[in-house]
Image (spheres, rainbow, N blue to C red):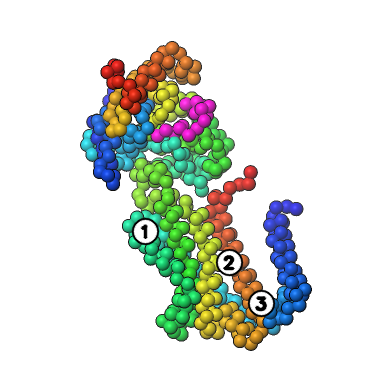
Amino acid sequence: MSPLIKIKDVRHAYETASGPLPVLDGLDVTVQEGGFCAVVGPSGCGKSTLTRLVAGLMHPDAGEVWLHGDLVKAPRSTVGMAFQNPVLLEWRTILQNVTLPLEIVPDGLKGAAAKERARYLLSLVGLDGFEDKRPSELSGGMRQRASLCRALVHQPEVLILDEPFGALDAFTREDLWQTMHQVKESEPFTAVLITHDLREALFLGDQVVVLSGRPARTQYVMDIPQTTRPTLDDLYTAEAAERLATLRHQIEIAQGRAAPEEAS
Amino acid sequence: MTPSLRKVVVPTLAIVIFLALWEALVWIMGWPNYKMASPSDLIPAYRQYWDLFLVMGWQTLWRTVLGLVLAIVVGTALGMIMGFSRTMRDALYPLLVGFNAIPKATVVPIVALMFVGAHDFNTVLIAFMISFFPIAVSVSIGLSTLEPEYRDILRALGASQTMIFRKIALPKTLPEFFGALKVSVTLAFIGTNLMEIVSPHGRGLGALFDSGKTNSDYPLMFAVLIALAVLGIVLYYVVVALEKIFAGWAERQPS
């Protein structure tokens, strides 16, 4: 199987008033089709830069980003994005928010078909009956669900999730983790998830990539054997605890708090 | 009382109470007309000059509205230029602030001399000059404070700049725009009347006010003030109605 996303030795520096600020320095990430890659790393290590690279919103100084065998040079309509801030448009109803990408991508569904598709996705995440509400009438978790539907509505090849659950309370977050698994069953996607939550990375990802502190490089990659329909209980097994400990340790190395020679 | 009925009854009652207090104040203090006219003095003034009020009120109204429309067009254009380009913002802001700080009463004689005889043009120009600033500032702030995620959502899908403006930047700026427009409406009235009063040319409610002054017809002067207030209220609520139609989403439902 060919990888859907291939990020090869990407390097990038931002221009700042006090000279160039390197953020990425040798980033390698490979995600297979249908894969779910969770990226964790210390704060400010350049994780969001990674999402902008995959989305084609910026070019790296060096290295290559490949998507489905094509070199990414510009934004392409085959990605869907969801951020920590759900950025729903307040003047549109939830249904109109979800159909927004279809108005922009070439040969997107139109009219009744677009609405049908949006309704289907909204019911998948448990938002039936909220189609005609305004975003301001929804709770944070519900807004994030709607934002997820919008990211999926045009059947993107890649779903880019930049800490989408970061601002939610713990229980809502766990609900949404399970929703993600349910959605993936009926709407298969390939995803890159940026997160600060190791349990989230473990529960959702089939691959966890640990980035080093800034400038970020790929420090550690953990493959997670996938079970069908994992439950939250799967996070409290001895196996999961061991993986969490390993990831925790890798983060400490990335933060410079632990010596790297202990790493495998 | 139903909420919609309350919306009419409460403000009407407030106006009636205001007029009663005014009447009482003049009556208790025993003020003659030249000190302060009372509401009951205004009725004969309106009756006597009703035709003039209609003609001149219309002159004031259309020139104010035209000045305001110009202010919307130019203010929005300036706001867009400053909202999208940081360089233009840095360049234009001090100029605009300086221009806005000049009291327009001092500009009136200059404009009147510059375009001598062109009364309608002069008046519209002053109404425009006094009212475009809030619109320009609000549009530029609305556009420049657009969160980058909003842009990214559409840009990542390959949307063009015009598409982003039409789908996101424009609707998102509308509440700020209408907030500024409410300020501009009253400012435009001030502009029109400045020209009509300071540089008399026999047109508009300002001219009527001026003739009240020269003839020592104090009730007429007060009647003009009230007429101006009524026009101001009408125009303000026209803007409110437009806001409800185009930016009603920004109003939170009372919970």
Q: Which residues are magenta?
A: A162-177
Horizontal and vertical percent for residue A51?
Answer: 34, 35
State which chain disc 3 sits on: B
- Percent x, y for residue A135? 53, 42
Rate crowding at label 2 as few (under 14), some (14 to 19) or many (20 or more) other CA atoms within 10 Å.
some
* Nearest to viewer (mark 2 / mark 3): 3
> SS class of the residue under badge 3?
helix
- Chain name for mark 1: B
Q: Earlier in the sequence, mark 1 or mark 3?
A: 1
Q: Going from the N terminus, do you reach mark 2 or mark 3 first?
A: 3
SS class, disc 1: helix
Vertical side of B58 occupied by A191: above or below: above
Residue A170 visible from this viewpoint = yes
Residue at label 2?
Answer: B235
- Residue sticking out furthest to the top: A238
Q: Residues within 10 Å of mark 3 (few under 14, many from 20)?
A: many
Q: What amino acid is found at the position of numbered circle 1 in the picture? A: Arg
Judging from the image, mark 2 belongs to the subunit labelled: B
Q: Amino acid at mark 3?
A: Ala
The amino acid type of the residue labelled 2 equals Leu
Label drawn at residue B89: 1
Per the image, label 2 sits on a secondary structure element best described as: helix
A171 shown above or below A109: above
Please indicate whether residue A126 sits to the left or right of residue B88 in the image: right
Residue A172: x, y in percent?
52, 29
Q: Which mark is residue B223?
A: 3
